[in-house]
Image (spheres, helix red, strand yellow):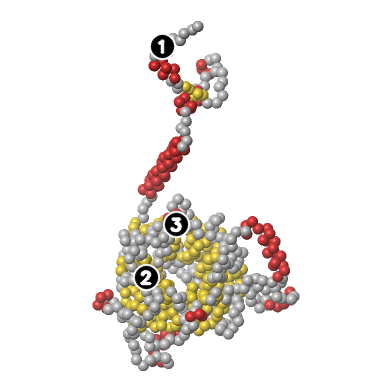
């Protein structure tokens, strides 16, 4: 019989030493027999060995402490990643060249919050509560107030007619009124869609006035129907009637300079005005002439023709050619194709269907050109619109309607431009010489209307569609400076395109050369708050555009170099709405723009500076 050593049985230290597990080395991978010579031994043996604690290998935390330990470790790791990301961004922000920031040049406090703004010549027209006001563009002083409405003005347009200005405010009820502003007098022409029977009242959704003010079009909606009304504006008669009011048959004997609830002039001693505007309600101007009512195209259905000869006879005059209305496809064939489509894509069609929206129209007044065929007997003065171009929501076709007609004439398009995909956005240049059609597939078609040919087709990057198009007045870069050419320019255009993903591109086309697409601003992936929400060209500065971001920042960019020239800082009391929809207006003749503040009813007048400043 053997007895245990006394030290083991009696010494507590011996017991602890027996229970203690010494650290061990473990080797990664398969073990191999070492070479007999030391020089052949691998020098990486120490790297293959890891130091492990036997206590940690054997013991593990019980639940729920093991889960808590994982969550705490995850939070620490994620926090450290966020700290590193912020540090990288802070370093990049400090290394990035900050543009010069300018404060508002003039800040004007208004009595009421403005809803909309428009600028023409040296005047600013601000729509607000129960009417609109007229301000001086240079000193931001109010010079006239017209408040006769019971509701607010939500949108306003102002068109330069030379020495006169045509003003078109739209109120909350959707009623649009035409005003004629001549020298120091304001005249009310007509409320276009105001009716006595409220059940027949329509709402003005969109409007457009031709260059020079010869025609106007109003998109009206009411009672589940929508139509486009086109008017001819007798601006020559207006000028005669305001210059010689005694010749007007409807003018009153006495001139009422002030009318209760109609005129609210501003005193000259408080605002130091140069002119005193009066409302001339005694003079009745000639009314616009309604020449055309256009309705959305009918959906393509089965044919009503009995033979192909009837189809060809229908399109002999080329009216409606390309619209898809004149065909020889029967109802049974349509039904068969719909059944095949539904059976093929049944799994994609089982979801809930969205309610079909009412068709909307986008329209432009086009000048005479080689690409637009007009009858030989029609003689159109130069610089006067002769055709109205229209495309409707979800339609592939761009319809062209002649403006040389009366309301009794049948409303049929003179020609149709079919596209490969539905047209989503269209834009006409300020000179009315260039047109861009953007389709649902991201393809842009560039047209030179003056010369009568296409400048080319260009596609936006994949998964990027067109949100808006903004034409730039064509400019050249000479010795690093942007400048407008001295002579006339033919078949050369530039425009910026804002994508639905927040990216910004410059599209340039020249003659028969292939159009180019240049990236100006990338899609904000890491900083969605920097996404562009609005773009506005500054015509007074060659190659410059204003960029409004969702975070409230406003920058001036040189599209030739893709560089930010400067930034504009709002006042400290300026608060943003979410999402921010900036209310602003840019002058066409002066390097300035106006921006509405949201915290207090203020109008911010900011001076733009060139890159050399």
Q: Of residues 485 and 407, which is closer to you in this image?
A: 407
Is 440 left, or right, of 113 in this rendering?
right
Residue 79 in the figure: left or right of residue 353: left
Is 88 above or below relative to 480? above
Return the x and y of residue 540 as percentages of the image width and height.
40, 67
C-alpha gap between disc 1 and disc 2: 97 Å
* Sequence order check, earlier mark of 3 and 1: 1
The residue positioned 48% from the left and 66% from the top of the image is 471
Label 3, residues with CA under 10 Å away: few <14, some 14-19, many ≥20: many
In which quadrant of the rendered image does the C terminus lie?
bottom left
Q: Between residues 66 and 210, which one lies in front from this camera angle?
A: 66
Viewer can see residue 491: no
Up/down of 328 relative to 533, above or below: below
Residue carrying label 1: 7
Residue carrying label 3: 531
Name the residue carrying label 2.
Answer: 114
Nearest to viewer (mark 2 / mark 3): 2
Of mark 2 and mark 3, the one earlier in the sequence is 2
Residue lying at the far left in this picture: please name it: 269
Horizontal and vertical percent position of residue 528: 45, 54
Circle 1 or circle 2, nearest the eye: 1
How many C-alpha atoms fall within 10 Å of the one at disc 2: few (<14), some, or many (≥20)? many
- Sequence order check, earlier mark of 1 and 2: 1
Q: Secondary structure at mark 2?
A: loop
Question: Which image quadrant for residue 78?
Answer: top left
């Amino acid at each position: 019989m053997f007895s245990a050593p006394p030290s083991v049985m009696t010494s507590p230290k011996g017991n602890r030493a027996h229970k203690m597990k010494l650290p061990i080395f473990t080797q990664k991978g398969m073990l191999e027999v070492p070479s007999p010579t030391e020089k052949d031994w691998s020098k990486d043996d120490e790297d293959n060995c890891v130091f492990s604690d036997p206590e940690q290998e054997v013991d593990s935390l019980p639940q729920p402490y093991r889960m808590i330990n994982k969550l705490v470790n995850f939070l620490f790791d994620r926090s450290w990643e966020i700290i590193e990301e912020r540090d990288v961004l802070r370093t990049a922000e400090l290394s990035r060249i900050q543009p010069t920031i300018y404060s508002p040049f003039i800040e004007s406090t208004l009595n009421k919050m403005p809803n909309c703004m428009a600028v023409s010549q040296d005047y600013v027209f601000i729509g607000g509560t129960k009417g609109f006001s007229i301000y001086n563009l240079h000193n931001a002083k109010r010079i006239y107030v017209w408040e006769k409405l019971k509701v607010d003005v939500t949108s306003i347009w102002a068109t330069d007619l030379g020495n006169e200005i045509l003003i078109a405010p739209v109120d909350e009820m959707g009623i649009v009124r035409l005003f004629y502003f001549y020298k120091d007098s304001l005249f009310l022409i007509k409320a276009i869609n105001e009716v006595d029977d409220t059940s027949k009242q329509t709402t003005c959704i969109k409007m457009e006035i031709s260059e020079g003010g010869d025609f106007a079009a109003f998109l009206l909606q009411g009672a589940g129907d929508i139509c486009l009304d086109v008017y001819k504006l007798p601006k020559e008669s207006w000028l005669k009637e305001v210059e010689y009011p005694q010749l007007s048959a409807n003018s009153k004997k006495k001139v009422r300079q002030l009318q209760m609830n109609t005129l609210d002039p501003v005193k000259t001693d408080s605002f130091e005005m140069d002119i005193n505007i009066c409302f001339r309600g005694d003079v009745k101007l000639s009314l616009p002439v309604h020449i055309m009512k256009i309705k959305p195209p009918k959906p393509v259905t089965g044919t009503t023709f009995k033979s192909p000869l009837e189809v060809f006879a229908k399109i002999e005059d080329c009216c409606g050619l390309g619209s898809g209305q004149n065909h020889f496809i029967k109802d049974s064939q349509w039904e068969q194709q719909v059944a095949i489509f539904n059976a093929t894509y049944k799994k994609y069609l089982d979801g809930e269907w969205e309610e079909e929206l009412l068709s909307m129209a986008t329209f432009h007044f086009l000048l005479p050109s080689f690409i637009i065929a007009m009858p030989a007997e029609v003689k159109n003065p130069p610089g006067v619109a002769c055709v109205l171009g229209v495309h409707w929501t979800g339609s592939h076709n761009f319809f062209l309607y002649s403006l040389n007609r009366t309301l009794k004439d049948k409303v049929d398009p003179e020609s149709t431009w079919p596209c490969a995909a539905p047209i989503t956005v269209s834009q006409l240049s300020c000179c009315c010489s260039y047109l861009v059609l953007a389709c649902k597939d991201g393809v842009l078609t560039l047209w030179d209307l003056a010369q009568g040919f296409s400048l080319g087709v260009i596609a936006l990057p994949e998964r990027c569609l067109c949100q808006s198009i903004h034409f730039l007045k064509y400019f050249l870069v000479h010795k690093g400076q942007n400048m407008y050419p001295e002579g006339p320019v033919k078949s050369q255009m530039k425009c910026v395109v804002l994508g639905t993903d927040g990216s910004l591109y410059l599209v340039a086309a020249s003659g028969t050369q292939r159009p180019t697409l240049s990236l100006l601003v990338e899609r904000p992936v890491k900083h969605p708050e920097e996404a562009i929400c609005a773009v506005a060209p500054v015509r007074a500065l060659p190659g410059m555009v204003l960029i409004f971001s969702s975070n409230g920042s406003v920058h001036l960019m040189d599209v030739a170099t893709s560089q930010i020239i400067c930034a504009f800082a709002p006042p400290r009391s300026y608060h943003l709405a979410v999402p921010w929809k900036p209310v602003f207006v840019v002058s066409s003749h002066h390097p300035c723009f106006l921006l509405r503040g949201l915290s207090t009813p203020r109008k911010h007048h900011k001076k733009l500076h060139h890159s050399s400043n």
